[in-house]
Image (tube, rainbow, N blue to C red):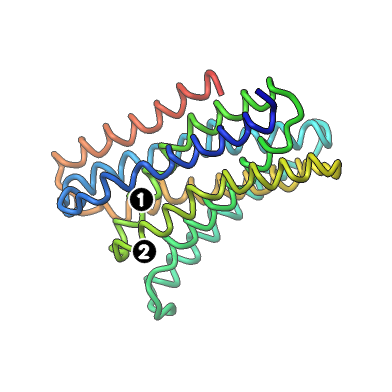
Amino acid sequence: MTLVIYKAIAAIIVFLISAAIIFPLKKKQLFRQAEFIDLGDALASGIFLGAAFFHMLPDAIKTFGMIYGNNTYPIPEAVCIAGFLLFLFLERLSLSNLLHSKNSIPYVVAIILVIHALIEGMALGIGETFSEAVMLFVAIVAHKGSESFALSIILVRYRLPFNQIVGIVLAFAAMTPLGIGFGTAINSLSIIEHGELAAAIFNAFAAGTFLYISTLHHIQFHKHTKESQGMGGFACLALGLVTMGVLALWV
């Protein structure tokens, strides 16, 4: 099996894993249950929180350290805070009725995840060895299903039309395969540009947005939750966080 064929198979598998959430989404009555939405939202918050602290921000800090050494201003942390403040600003605009359109938060989350998925795919596509490609493929697969689930829960929470939710999920599912194809094409043309710095900046920014979604945004939605449901939500949030922490042991 050539490396190009392996990357093509990897792209198909990643797409199927990401798009698999569409099948439970079709059972609309399941997602109409308020308790399921609350627990699913809490689990998604834990996944986002874990992705921020166990994956994105550490990767950004590591890359900045490799490029500039360890004696620089904490730029990744500053970019992370900028992402957090941007989402806080957008939600305050929505709450103050300065934005007359539908709340922008779910769309911004979708854009962040789509761009991140594209960057992940390009990293795999640019890889020049089987060992590098396998390592990146395992890392992507480990997070892809949970990220697709978390994105779906956010979109359902904001009551977006079902067809629009499916379209966004499919777009997210397609981004990593597109990135793999684009990275492979760049590699074959011998004009490789890893873009580690740009990827690190984006990871740090995405970590800040995920931190906001999993903390202040989560509290905003669940501040009137009953005590019994609150403990269940906390358990789901902890489960998502622990799951991402365990995945960090291998990827």
Dot 2 falls on a residue whose secondary structure is helix
Residue 228 spot, x, y in % from top left:
13, 39
Dot 1 falls on a residue whose secondary structure is helix
Tally of marks: 2
In the figure, is residue 246 to the left or right of 129? left
Q: In the image, what residue occupies the spot 65% across and 23% down?
A: 1
Residue 118 spot, x, y in % from top left:
61, 48
Q: Nearer the viewer, residue 243 or 232?
A: 243
Q: Which residue is mark 2?
A: 164
Q: Nearer the viewer, residue 243 or 24?
A: 24
Q: Earlier in the sequence, mark 1 or mark 2?
A: 1
- Is the residue 228 above or below the residue 136 in the image? below
Residue 157 spot, x, y in % from top left:
29, 56
The three-letter code of the residue at mark 1 reads Ser
Q: In the image, what residue occupies the spot 39% across and 69% down?
A: 103
In the figure, is residue 64 to the left or right of 226? right
Q: In the image, what residue occupies the spot 43% across and 77% down?
A: 99
The three-letter code of the residue at mark 2 reads Gln
Looking at the rendering, which quadrant does residue 232 occupy?
A: top left
Q: Which residue is mark 1?
A: 152
In the figure, is residue 108 to the left or right of 158? right
Question: Residues at badges 1 and 2 in contact (C-beta under 8 Å)?
Answer: no
Which residue of the protein is positioned furthest toward the front in this rendering? 1
Front tag of 1 and 2: 2
Which residue of the protein is positioned furthest toward the right in this rendering? 190
